[in-house]
Amino acid sequence: MNPPPDGTAPPIVLTRRRINVIFSALLAGMLVAALDQTIVSTSMPTIVGELGGVSHMAWVTTAYLLATTLVMPVYGKFGDLWGRRTLFLVAIGLFTVASVGAALAPDFGWFVFWRGVQGLGGGGLMILSQAIIADIVPARERARYMGPIGALFGLSAVAGPLVGGFFTDTAALGWEWCFWINVPVGVGAFLIGWIALSLPRRRSTTPLDVAGIAALSATTTSLVLFTDLGGSDGWTDPWTLALAAAFVVCAVVFVLVERRAVEPIVPLTLFRNPTFVVATAMGMAVGLGMFSAIAFMPTFLQMSSGLSAAGSGLLMLPMTAGIILTIQSSAAVILRTGRYKRFTVAGVAVILATMVWMTTLTGGTSLWVIGAMFFALGCGLGLIMQNVVLAAQNAVPATQIGTATSTNNYFREVGATLGVAVFGTLFTSRLAENLTGALTANAPQAAAAGISSPDTLVPSAVDAAGEPLRTAIVDAYAGSLAPVFWYLVPVLAVALLLSFLLREIPLAEHAGMVARGEAVESEEELATLLRSGAQAAVPAPEPTLHGPRDDDQLRV
């Protein structure tokens, strides 16, 4: 075992009670972020309509994802260097303050800004929760904690749209309460974390990789803006080409900076690890394909089916059922057998098949069929997302758990951001053109219904428009959304191929804090340690326990 970070403080005893208390604090933090994302999904059509931003709808999601992506590597590396407790509390605080700003936003621009600030907090909650679980629970036992996490996100997937729909549909409240509700939840999560999150603090005199952080931020921002402008203004537009050039330059600078950094924000050595690389590439490909569908389907449902925001939220129930079903069943098998590769293969295959199915969407598709699509999507999500992170964490040394977790999630979020940006711009550019045609063809009826332009179109106006204008608007949405799913199919086919290449490393038997010498697993071990005065009194895990084994030990 390695000595404690400060050389004097005794290790923490990871009793089952302590693990459960810490885990409860993590669940409270994750609830804040998970609830917010699902609340906004069903309220988005009304929000962008009232704030005059329908043609720029994609920025509501892109801003949050971009900010989340930018800070992930920072939280991961800083947590490895200094400990994760303070960072976790900072992330909750940022998220709560930004919720107040979003609720008070006077126009669409300010709303997008505060969504970005929320992403700065949400990125930390996502990364630090996963890293802390790896710190306190061995890889093989980690599967049993996937169930509660899956249930939490499942609960959020149901409660969020219902609560958001209720606020949006209630005139006395309004969509602003989708963000006001985060304030008491965020304060409660902060207090739980302050009291319950007992984790070691570390001291590091290593200089910060400021240049690496700046270069990575510039690379990510230029890439996302390039895809967004390319989809809306054209791929040969001068600004689009300038952003493409900026991305290439920033990426080269980032690699050069990281090669010289004492403690790089993203160690390039991670990419010499084939298991980590494959798991990360899979997460990126799946993120690109799947989150695009989740982001825009509620809008389609409200416009095409005449559902209220709450009604479209109810159609998330099948996806929740799929997530809970597959995450619980796969976790039980992993805990018993230690095998996880089969679930990643099955998960990608299910998502790929669902994307092909979604290309058949029309304005007349029944809600039963759409519910079945959501159920299949949830099954794929429950099978793959946690297992990809598990594979990445298990493939690196215990000292790099936070960095590996953040890098894996970073590339997944890059995929999600690119997917939403490209998918969103393709969808909204088609939609603006189709809606303009529909409104022009039915100009007198549109004027009578108070629909002056596509940018101010809200679900209630569509429902009240009457025929044939309503059918024209519904067909415009369906004709804009369904064909775009075909662009995601090749990406998911690549992810399926990668899933077969994933090497299955035996899962580690010790938690990350135990492997680093920051914790022991029982009071008896601590007593022995203190009596002997030697840190080596506790049996040390193998140095390569979290890393790749020899080929003959790999189970493929």
Image (spheres, helix red, strand yellow):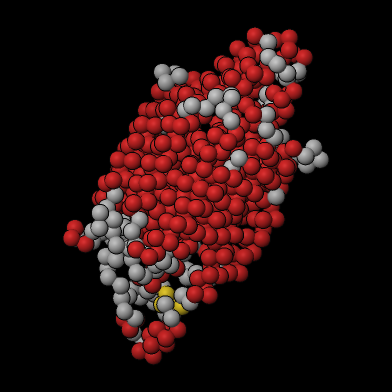
In x, y percent, where is residue 49? 68, 28
* Residue 213 in view in this figure: no
Q: Is residue 57 left or right of residue 205?
A: right
In x, y percent, where is residue 217? 44, 41
In front of the other: 227 or 521: 521
Q: Examine the rendered structure and indicate whether residue 478 appears above or below residue 73.
A: above
Q: Residue at x 37, y 34 (%)?
A: 491
Q: Residue extending furthest right?
A: 172
In front of the other: 237 or 318: 318
* Residue 342 in view in this figure: yes
Residue 58 lies in quadrant: top right
Q: Examine the rendered structure and indicate whether residue 241 appears above or below residue 96.
A: above
Q: Residue at x 53, y 65 (%)?
A: 23
In front of the other: 355 or 366: 366
What is the quadrant of the C terminus in the image? bottom left
What is the quadrant of the N terminus in the image? bottom left
Q: Examine the rendered structure and indicate whether residue 327 appears above or below residue 102.
A: below
Q: Residue extending furthest bottom?
A: 531
